[in-house]
Amino acid sequence: MPWHETDAMDQRCRFVMSYRSGRFEMTELCRSYGVSRPTGYKWVRRYEREGAPGLQERSRAPHSCPHRMSKKSAQWLLAERRAHPHWGPRKLRRRYQTVHSHTSAPSRSAIADLLRREGLSQQRRTRRFASVKGQRACSSCAPNQLWTIDYKGAFLTGDHRSCHPLTLMDHSSRYLLECAAHGAISGNAVERCMQQTFRQYGLPEAIHSDNGAPFASNGLASLSRLSVSWLKLGIALQRSRPASPQDNGGHERMHRTLKAETAQPPAANLRAQQHRFDRFRSEYNRERPHEALHDDTPSAHYYPSLRPYPSKIEPPDYPGHFHVRSVRTDGSIKWQGRLLYVTKALYGERVALEEIEDDLWSLYFMTHLLGRFDARTRKIISVPV
């Protein structure tokens, strides 16, 4: 007959007593009680060694576990989690490997179990994401090939002033080059900030931005005064497609982390908010593991550019067959005795035209093609930079 959970001890005692009476064979008893022969012999041996207490249920847990997390490791992981509330098991494990390189790290599942037991994590709800068709506008395989820049959405500090975080990041290494708290969106403020960054890290080959001010405009080739200053330094321009933040996905993901760790809630004022940004940038670059870098830190992959920021910017030098014109303060040039509007973003600069067909000209600034000029209609067709 099968075992009954409520009187398992009594059933085992009857089984052993029946066997010891000598009236029943082991095979017959096992069939009657619904157990295997190894189990039957096990009960008999335990009774002979320990008596009736040997028939009590025993724990099946192993006596030792070589992979069990030590108390010291658990305490360190919990302290690190409380210091970085947004880090998950993967980042915590990588950080543990970096700090405790002489010992083996607990598994991600063990760390996840620890966080759940301590009430420091919650099960995430499965989310469905719509598939996005299209291609990223930016690509790079080495530091300083491409930098990405953007203004994070504004928020109010404790004194009710607007804070517009300006962020600049190296696309390849994810190194956060700058994170500045600005009181307003300003092209002049961005240019001053960029000059300091150029002096410290050198010049990138290209900069990727969205199509908003102060990085772009509605004028010819979407040029702004800020983007013109980059072109003069020999920096190529890349821009996201309209309404396509996924073209700069790595930067947008960094913004989400920045908001969660520095602005919820915001600091008392802009100065205090800048202190938070500085601490975040240091941690982001030197401590926080990044999945895109195989859990390395950005500082392990980034190095400054070999192109230094020049002390003097030379004016553009055009080939001899180009027709060079100076852009006036109103954004126009003189062409065949009449004014032709180009863009105010280029005032004070020299542009050049090259004839490619009868009455059809290419308009250049530096080496960048800005548009096609039809001399018969006197219209310039913009070519995105």
Image (cartoon, rainbow, N blue to C red):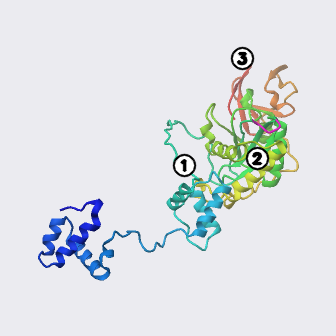
Disc 3 designates what residue? 377
The reply to whether dot 3 and dot 2 touch (C-beta < 8 Å) is no
Q: Report which residue position mark 1 lands on.
A: 122
Q: Quadrant of residue 219?
A: top right
Residue 73 on image: x %, y %: 59, 67
Q: Which residues are magenta?
A: 155-159
Q: Nearer the viewer, mark 1 or mark 2?
A: 1
Q: From what the image shows, is residue 371 above or below residue 140?
A: above
Residue type of the residue flagged with mark 2: Cys
Q: Is 357 in front, or is 212?
A: 212
Residue 147's place in the image compared with 35, above or below, is above
Residue 50 seen from this side:
yes
Residue found 11% across the figure and 76% down from its top: 23
Residue drawn at 56 percent across, 51 percent down: 121
On screen, residue 119 versus residue 382, left or right, reads left
Residue type (three-letter) at the residue carrying disc 3: Thr
Magenta portion: prevailing SS class: loop
- Local SS, label 1: loop
Q: Position of residue 4 (x, y in %)?
A: 25, 60
In the rendered structure, find residue 179 and report the number of the disc placed on it: 2
Q: Nearer the viewer, residue 4 or 191?
A: 4
Q: CA distance from mark 1 to mark 3?
A: 65 Å
- Please tell me which residue is depicted at 51% across the width and 58% down the height of the picture: 113
Question: Relative to 92, does residue 193 appear above or below in the rendering?
Answer: above
